[in-house]
Image (spheres, rainbow, N blue to C red):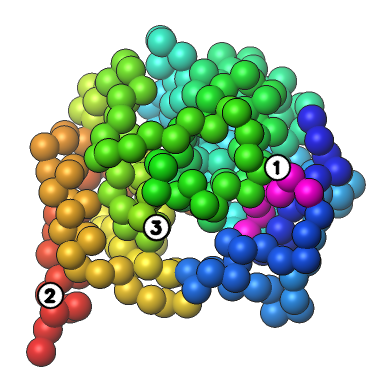
Amino acid sequence: MRPDLPICATCGVQYSASREDCPICLDERQYVGWDGQQWTSLAELERAGHRGAIEEEGPGVTGIGASPATAIGQRALLIRTPAGNILWDMITYLDEDLIAAVSALGGVSAIAISHPHFYGSMIEWAHAFGAPVYIHAADRQWIARPDESVVFWEGDTHSLGDGLTLINAGVHFDGGQVLHWAGGENGRGALFSGDIFTVVPDRRWVSFMYSYPNLIPERPRTIRRAVSLIEPLRFEAVYGAWWKRVVRADGVAAVRRSAERYYRFALDG
């Protein structure tokens, strides 16, 4: 593990070498912290008292985060299947205790991440578990720590096997991806959306933004394409990016009605 490598304190993405700026935060979808660019590292986070946090989030789905939370505060999800575990999305924090705890759950066979704001310490996790990291090729430019563990895929969908399929929704980022698990929710299906389709606080709806912190709405045509790609899929639950942000019932209808509401407000007048 490389606990010394620089990590952007605002977005939580680890870089391969020291630098003055974070291109991910300079982009209009994110922001540089109000006190200017700040850096940390895994070693500094551990010294500050951060530790791994693990909690069940659904059938066969375990949340993995940090306590206290770091950067954007998202948690990852370990999807446990007989063919191997998939780590969906990513966090910044990792230490030996967290590696041991995840190994006790069966480890990680593959990693897939929704978009660049959640790249975190993905290479540390990939090396710790010998797992490839699946990223859509449209987001290649945002890789902060190039590594042979990263697998770039192209097109609209990519199968990870065992009923797990990545879909290039293209919301938020051109390579923004969601993950469908046909066997999730005891066979009723689950969609893992990060904040590509973000689960909002009332947990019956999702929403779509080009930038969340800067409140830039996503283009309706982009949402229409994304919804059309998932229209053939069946899923009961939609797992968002933060603890407990889960649509528990009738996820297909929740995404559909959320998109219709978005169009209605975006195109009104």
Residue under numbered circle 1: 93
Q: In the displayed structure, does residue 211 sit left or right of residue 127?
A: left
Q: Residue 12: horizontal and vertical position, in percent?
A: 66, 54
The first of marks 1 and 3 along the sequence is 1
Task: Return the mark for residue 10.
Answer: none
Could you tell me if the residues under marks 1 and 3 are in contact, i.e. CB atoms within 8 Å?
Answer: no
What residue is rendered at 61% in x and 63% in y?
A: 23
Q: Residue 144: horizontal and vertical position, in percent?
A: 63, 49
User: Local crowd at mark 3 within 10 Å, few (<14), some, or many (≥20)?
Assistant: many
Q: Residue 247: horizontal and vertical position, in percent?
A: 30, 47
Numbered disc in front, either 3 or 2? 3
Q: Residue 125: horizontal and vertical position, in percent?
A: 65, 31
Q: Nearer the viewer, residue 221 or 49?
A: 221
**Magenta span:** 11-17
Label 1 to label 2, Cα distance in Å? 40 Å
Label 2: state its secondary structure.
Answer: helix
The first of marks 1 and 2 along the sequence is 1
User: Local crowd at mark 1 within 10 Å, few (<14), some, or many (≥20)?
Assistant: many
User: Local crowd at mark 2 within 10 Å, few (<14), some, or many (≥20)?
Assistant: few
Residue under numbered circle 2: 264
Q: In the displayed structure, does residue 119 sit left or right of residue 205?
A: right
Label 3 to label 2, Cα distance in Å? 23 Å
Q: Quadrant of residue 52?
A: top right
| Residue type beneath disc 2 | Arg
Q: Nearer the viewer, residue 137 or 242?
A: 137
Q: Residue furthest top?
A: 82
Location of residue 85 with respect to 136 vertically, above or below: above
Q: Is residue 87 visible?
A: no
| Residue type beneath disc 3 | Phe
Residue under numbered circle 3: 173
Label 3: state its secondary structure.
Answer: loop
